[in-house]
C-alpha cells in the first residue's frame, strides 16, 4: 500500500512520550519547484542534488562548529519519517526536510525553516509534508514548495496517484477539553496533487485508506465503512460492539480490498495505560475479529483470552504484500516490540526496539527493513534519534543525528 505515517495527532490522543516544544517562525521553504516545469527522472535528480552529505546542524545557516549535544536547539529534532523503498526516503525535522538515497546512511537537506509534523509518499519523486496547517509537496523528489492550506488540523493523507488523493480535515480540539466530546472529521479530495481540495463526502470520517482511485475504507467512532465511488458515498460494514461510551477515535490501515485492520482508541489514560482495541478483517469487511486489546482499563469489558500489544496504542501500517507491521507502546520499558502479522493474525516476525518509551513515528518497506524515531534521555534533556533495522528488528543502528 502506498502511503505514509503521520505524527500529527490530537493532544488528547498522544502516546505517553516526551514531546518537544520547538519555537520556530513560520516561513517558506528554501527551494521551490514550479509545478508546470517538467520534472527530471528521479535517478538524475538524486545524483545531481542528493549527494550523500551530512545535514547541517544549525538553522538556517550552517554552523562552523558542531553543537555541544545533539539535543541542543542547534540540532533539529526528528519528527516524521517515511521510506518508499530500501534506499529512498525522507526525514521530517523540527526545521525542515532531509532526504536519503542510501537507506538513511547519509542525508542531504532539501528544505529549511519549516517544522514538519507528518510525511506521506507515492514514489521516489512525489511526496507530501505537513507543517502545522500547511501542506507541502515535491514532484521531482528534490525540491519542495507549499501546495495548500486545506484545513486547520490535518489527519490522514493518502495519494493513490501523483495527482489523486484524499485528506481528513479534523475538528480542532476545544479548550478546555474534557475528552467526552466526539470530535468530527471531514473528507477532502484532490485531483491536482494537493494544490486544491474539495469536500468529498458529507459524513463524518476520522481515518481513511484507499486502495485505488475509486475504492477505499473509512472509519469514524466505532463504525467502519467502504466506498466504491471515490469517497462520495459510503456503505457501513460494521458498528463495532464496544461496552464503553467512548468517545472512540479509529485508525484504519488496509492492504487491498480484502484485508484491513482498525485500531480504536479513547483519549484517556490511567496508571500508564490507555484504552485501545484492534480489529482485523480478511474477507472484505464481512466479519471482524477482535485481535488485541488494552488490558488494564478494558479488561472487564473484553474477553479474557484477547492478548495485549502494549499499554498504549500502537503505530502500525500494511505492507503491499498484505501483511501488517506493528510497533507497540509500553512506557516505561527497556524495549518496545515490533511485530509482523499475516492477514489471518499469525505472527510472522518479531523484533525489539531499544527505546524506553514509545516511538514517535515509524516506516517499514518490508518485514526486514524499517526505520523508527524515538526519544533518547539524558540527565537534563531529551532528544530524538532515528534507528534503522535491516534484519526485522533483531538489531538496530543509530542513523540520526549523525
Image (tube, grey):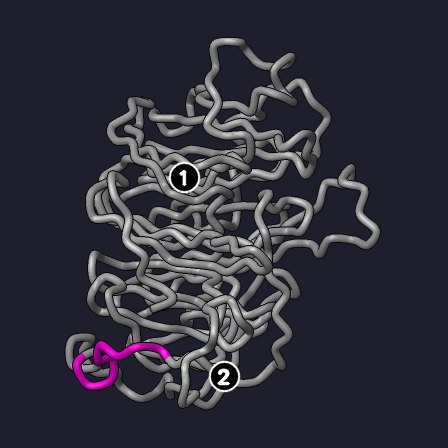
Q: Which mark is residue 118?
A: none
Q: Given the current orientation, which residue lies at the most extreme right position?
A: 176
Whether 177 is drawn above or below 146: the answer is above
Residue 195 x, y percent position in the rendering: 48, 75
Query: What secondary structure is the magenta-colored segment mainly?
Result: loop
Residue at the outermost top position: 304
Residue 371 in view (yes/no): yes
Residue 114 x, y percent position in the rendering: 52, 77
**Residue at the far front in the pictured view:** 379
The one nearer the camera, 398 or 358, is 398
Residue position marked by numbered label 2 in the rendering: 59
Q: Is residue 227 visible?
A: no
Residue depicted at 53% across the width and 9% down the height? 304
Location of residue 133 in the rendering, given as x and y in whole percent from the top left corner: 60, 68
- Write the residue at 39% across / 81% down: 56
Image quarter of residue 66: bottom left
Pick whichever of labels 2 and 1 is earlier in the sequence. Answer: 2
Asked if residue 164 is among those painted magenta in the image, a careful observer would answer no
* Few, some or many residues within 10 Å of mark 2 (<14, 14–19, 20+): some
In percent of width and height, residue 312 lies at 55, 34
The residue that mark 1 highlights is 327
In the rendered view, tell whether residue 294 sits above or below residue 157.
above
Q: Is there a contact, CB below 8 Å, between mark 2 and mark 1? A: no
Neighbourhood count class around disc 1 (C-alpha, 10 Å): few under 14, some 14–19, many 20 upward? many
Nearer mark to the viewer, of 2 and 1: 2
Q: Magenta residues, as a range?
A: 47-55
Residue at x 44%, y 19% (from the top left corner)? 289
Is disc 1 placed on a helix, strand or loop? strand
Residue at left offset 63%, top offset 61%: 153
Q: Is residue 213 above or below residue 286?
A: below
Instruction: Give the distance between the C-alpha atoms of the residues marked 2 and 1, in whole angstroms.
Output: 32 Å
Q: Quadrant of residue 200?
A: bottom right
Amino acid at each position: 500500500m502506498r502511503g505514509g505515517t503521520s505524527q500529527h495527532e490530537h493532544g488528547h490522543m498522544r502516546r505517553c512520550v516526551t514531546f518537544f516544544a520547538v519555537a520556530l517562525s513560520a516561513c517558506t521553504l528554501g527551494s521551490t519547484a514550479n509545478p508546470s516545469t517538467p520534472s527530471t527522472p528521479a535517478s538524475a535528480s538524486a545524483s545531481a542534488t542528493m549527494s550523500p552529505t551530512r545535514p547541517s546542524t544549525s538553522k538556517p545557516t550552517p554552523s562552523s562548529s558542531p553543537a555541544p549535544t545533539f539535543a541542543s536547539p542547534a540540532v533539529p529534532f526528528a519528527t516524521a519519517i517515511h521510506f518508499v523503498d530500501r534506499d529512498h526516503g525522507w526525514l521530517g525535522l523540527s526545521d525542515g526536510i532531509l532526504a536519503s538515497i542510501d537507506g538513511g546512511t547519509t542525508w542531504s537537506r532539501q528544505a529549511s525553516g519549516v517544522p514538519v509534523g507528518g510525511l506521506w509518499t507515492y514514489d521516489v519523486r512525489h511526496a507530501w509534508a505537513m507543517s502545522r496547517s500547511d501542506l507541502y509537496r515535491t514532484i521531482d523528489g528534490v525540491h519542495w514548495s507549499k501546495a495548500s492550506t486545506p484545513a486547520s488540523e490535518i489527519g490522514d493523507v493518502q495519494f493513490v496517484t501523483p495527482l489523486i488523493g484524499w485528506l481528513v480535515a479534523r475538528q480542532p480540539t476545544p479548550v478546555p477539553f474534557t475528552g467526552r466530546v466526539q470530535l468530527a472529521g471531514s473528507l477532502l479530495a484532490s485531483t491536482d496533487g494537493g494544490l486544491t481540495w474539495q469536500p468529498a463526502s458529507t459524513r463524518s470520517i476520522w481515518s481513511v485508506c484507499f486502495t485505488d482511485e475509486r475504492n477505499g475504507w473509512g472509519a469514524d467512532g466505532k463504525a467502519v465503512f467502504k466506498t466504491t465511488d471515490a469517497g462520495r458515498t459510503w456503505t457501513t460494514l460494521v458498528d463495532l460492539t464496544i461496552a464503553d461510551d467512548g468517545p472512540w477515535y479509529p485508525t484504519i490501515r488496509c492492504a487491498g480490498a480484502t484485508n484491513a485492520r482498525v485500531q480504536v482508541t479513547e483519549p484517556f489514560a490511567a496508571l500508564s495505560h490507555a484504552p485501545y482495541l484492534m480489529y482485523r478483517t480478511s474477507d472484505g469487511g464481512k466479519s471482524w475479529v477482535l485481535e488485541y486489546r488494552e488490558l488494564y482499563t478494558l479488561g472487564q469489558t473484553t474477553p479474557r483470552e484477547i492478548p495485549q500489544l502494549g499499554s498504549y496504542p500502537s503505530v502500525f501500517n500494511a505492507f503491499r504484500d498484505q501483511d501488517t507491521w506493528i510497533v507497540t507502546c509500553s512506557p516505561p520499558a527497556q524495549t518496545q516490540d515490533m511485530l509482523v502479522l499475516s492477514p489471518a493474525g499469525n505472527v510472522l516476525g518479531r523484533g525489539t526496539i531499544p527505546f524506553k518509551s514509545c516511538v514517535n513515528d515509524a516506516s517499514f518497506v518490508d518485514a526486514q527493513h524499517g526505520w523508527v524515531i524515538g526519544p533518547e534521555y539524558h540527565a537534563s534533556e531529551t532528544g530524538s534519534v532515528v534507528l534503522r533495522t535491516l534484519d526485522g528488528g533483531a538489531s538496530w543502528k543509530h542513523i540520526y543525528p549523525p
